[in-house]
Image (spheres, rainbow, N blue to C red):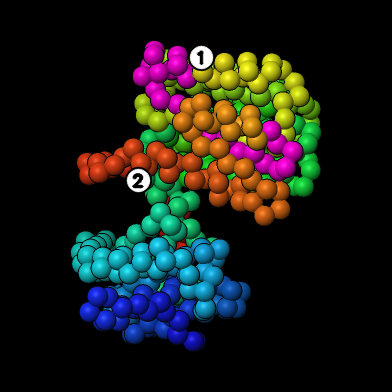
């Protein structure tokens, strides 16, 4: 295997090496046991695969980045910020090593192998210890994992408002919108509440269970039910912005009144590919938004941010931009052929991350979930 690693130098010109989990040869690598990790791609699994490699001494960390960011030679990053992140996170290797050693002592009494110690950065770089060769290269983005979003943004009430009008059948937009919505759902944790509103001529709530008109806790069960419902959405009809926002605010207020809310940030993610063709005019839509956000702030002390996404060249970019700006949210235009709707919608939480500041007392909890690299 060809050794590939990112090498830079510190102020004293001492080489600092970060090993690439996709292609590096580790200093003291060995095969994992078959019950630890077997890569099926090598031979189909079922005993026909090959054992993964990892650092024998379990003292070396590796870094990985999403494939979209690996634009340099040997799949290395070219972005100076990513390179700098690889450098400064290497300084955490000593702490990570000590923590893993302590974890081994603790879990040894239960005859259990400890999980990795890891860190994710806001630019997509991921570092974990002990170092292992990645089973799949470039597929992992820490920013889309529940533990990262929970830790960086805190509890949230999230309402997705999705355009399912007839024009969404063009250029594969409906499939793209579903993928983006599902990605957002997957980032949520049990500290969050969520609802999905679909709109065309009228609006309706995509239910996670039987008939609720409230936001639901983002448990794994509720998320899976929502994902199934999103996958079954069909397009057709006109485009009624007002109906989508009215139902979103109604659901939010009912949830807050009945104390099912997270009690923290409120985000409405509004995605459309067209212009308003049904329902009240845009001026009335803006009036509804201003009145509703003011009501939530006055009665319940809740600050609401609206994030709008204009998909395709036919979308009313002026209206969606004005809607987002009216709540100090963010408007994002997304092209049909080279835009990244999934990444854009999944990045809404970054605005909330700014509000956490230097709050060192904040702790985020997530529901147990399947680890990305294994069945455990």
- For the residue labelled by badge 2, is the local secondary structure a helix, a strand or a loop? helix
Would you say 173 lies left or right of 328 here? Answer: right
38 or 281, which is in the foreground? 281
Res 164 → quadrant = top right
Q: Residue at x 58, y 20 (%)?
A: 286
Res 90 → quadrant = bottom left
The residue pinned by badge 1 equals 291
Task: Give, as a single range, the part of the protein colored magenta.
Answer: 292-316
- Where is residue 369 drawn, in percent x and y? 43, 50
Q: Residue at x 49, y 87 (%)?
A: 2
> Which mark is in front, 1 or 2?
1
Q: CA distance from mark 1 to mark 2?
A: 32 Å
Q: Which class describes the residues within 10 Å of circle 2: few (<14), some (14-19), or many (20+)?
A: some
- Where is residue 202 drawn, in percent x and y? 71, 21
- For the residue labelled by badge 1, is the local secondary structure a helix, a strand or a loop? helix
Q: Is residue 19 above or below residue 287?
A: below
Q: Residue at x 63, y 15 (%)?
A: 284
Q: Can you say which quadrant of the picture contains the C terminus?
A: bottom left
Determine if the magenta segment contains residue 308: yes
- Where is residue 133 drawn, in percent x and y? 45, 75
Q: Name the mark on residue 151.
A: 2
Q: Name the mark on residue 125.
A: none
- Where is residue 183 drawn, in percent x and y? 55, 46
């Amino acid at each position: 295997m060809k050794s590939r690693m990112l090498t830079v130098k510190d102020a004293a010109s001492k080489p600092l090496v970060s090993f690439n989990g996709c292609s590096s040869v580790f200093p003291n690598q060995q095969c994992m046991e078959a019950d630890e990790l077997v890569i099926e791609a090598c031979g189909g699994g079922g005993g026909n695969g090959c054992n993964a490699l990892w650092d024998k001494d379990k003292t070396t960390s590796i870094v990985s980045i999403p494939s979209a960011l690996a634009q340099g030679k040997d799949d290395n990053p070219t972005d100076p910020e990513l390179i700098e992140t690889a450098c400064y996170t290497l300084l955490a290797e000593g702490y990570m090593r000590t923590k893993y050693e302590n974890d081994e002592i603790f879990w040894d009494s239960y005859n259990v192998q400890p999980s990795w110690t890891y860190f994710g950065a806001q630019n997509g770089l991921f570092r974990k210890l002990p170092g292992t060769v990645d089973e799949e290269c470039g597929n992992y983005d820490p920013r889309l994992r529940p533990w990262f979003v929970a830790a960086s943004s805190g509890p949230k009430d999230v309402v997705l408002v999705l355009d399912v009008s007839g024009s969404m059948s063009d250029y594969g937009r409906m499939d793209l919108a579903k993928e983006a919505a599902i990605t957002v759902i997957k980032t949520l944790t049990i500290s969050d509440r969520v609802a999905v509103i679909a709109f065309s001529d009228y609006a309706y709530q995509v239910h996670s269970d039987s008939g609720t008109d409230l936001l639901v806790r983002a448990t794994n069960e509720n998320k899976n039910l929502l994902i199934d419902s999103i996958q079954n959405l069909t397009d057709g009809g006109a485009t009624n912005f007002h109906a989508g926002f009215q139902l979103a605010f109604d659901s939010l207020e009912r949830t807050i009144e009945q104390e099912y809310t997270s009690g923290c940030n409120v985000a409405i993610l509004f995605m459309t590919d067209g212009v308003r063709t049904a329902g009240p005019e845009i001026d009335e839509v803006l009036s509804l938004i201003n009145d509703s956000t003011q009501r939530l702030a006055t009665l319940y002390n809740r600050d609401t941010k609206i994030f709008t996404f204009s998909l395709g060249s036919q979308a009313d970019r002026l209206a969606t931009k004005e809607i987002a700006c009216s709540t100090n949210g963010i408007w994002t235009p997304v092209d049909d052929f080279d835009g990244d709707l999934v990444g854009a919608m999944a990045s809404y939480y970054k605005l909330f991350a700014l509000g956490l500041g230097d709050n060192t007392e904040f702790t985020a909890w997530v529901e147990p979930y399947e680890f990305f690299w294994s069945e455990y």
